[in-house]
Image (spheres, rainbow, N blue to C red):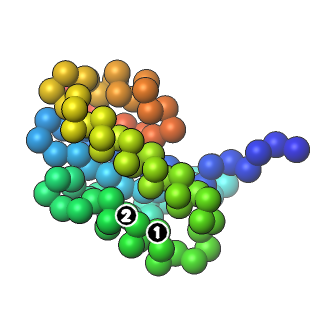
């Protein structure tokens, strides 16, 4: 049996001074915004994403945790590599997320 398709997708704006994080929900190959963008470190983006996910009882705990863990990893990577890594390099390292490149 095939694994269930991922329902949540973390979207990332990788910028020099701020990291934007949002979550989309995919239903039957169609994506819908589940949250707005939250910008770290200007706001507690991780906490805001967690509150939003916790308010959606139809989402599985496993997928909520997986998405928040991915956000944690990306925030940590941004903290140490924001001035050296370009968005394409980071997107290759975190293929589970969708990176929005504003420099195109």
The residue indicated by pointer 2 is 49
Q: Is residue 24 visible?
A: yes
> Does residue 104 appear in this view?
no
In the image, 74 versus 3, the foreground residue is: 74
Residue beneath the point at 67% across and 54% down:
28
Quarter that holds the N terminus: top right
Residue denoted by label 1: 53
Q: Residues within 10 Å of mark 2 (few under 14, many from 20)?
A: many
Q: Residue at x 47, y 78 (%)?
A: 55
Which of the pair 32/96 is nearer the observer? 96
Q: Are marks 1 and 2 in contact (CB under 8 Å)?
A: yes
| Quadrant of the rendered image containing residue 103 | top left
Quadrant into which the C terminus falls: top left
Q: Is residue 86 left or right of residue 63?
A: left
Q: How many marks?
A: 2
Secondary structure state at the residue bearing disc 1: helix
Residue 4 versus residue 70: which sits nearer the camera? Answer: 70
Tell me the distance, in whole angstroms, between the alpha carbons under discs 1 and 2: 6 Å
Determine the secondary structure under disc 2.
helix
């Amino acid at each position: 049996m095939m694994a269930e398709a991922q329902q949540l997708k973390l979207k990332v704006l990788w910028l020099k001074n701020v990291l934007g994080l949002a979550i989309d929900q995919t239903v039957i190959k169609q994506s819908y915004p589940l949250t707005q963008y939250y910008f770290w470190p200007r706001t507690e983006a991780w906490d805001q994403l967690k509150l939003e996910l916790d308010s959606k009882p139809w989402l599985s705990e496993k997928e909520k945790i997986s998405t928040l863990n991915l956000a944690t990893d990306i925030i940590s990577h941004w903290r140490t590599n924001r001035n050296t890594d370009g968005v394409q390099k980071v997107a290759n390292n975190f293929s589970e997320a969708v990176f929005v490149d504003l420099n195109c």
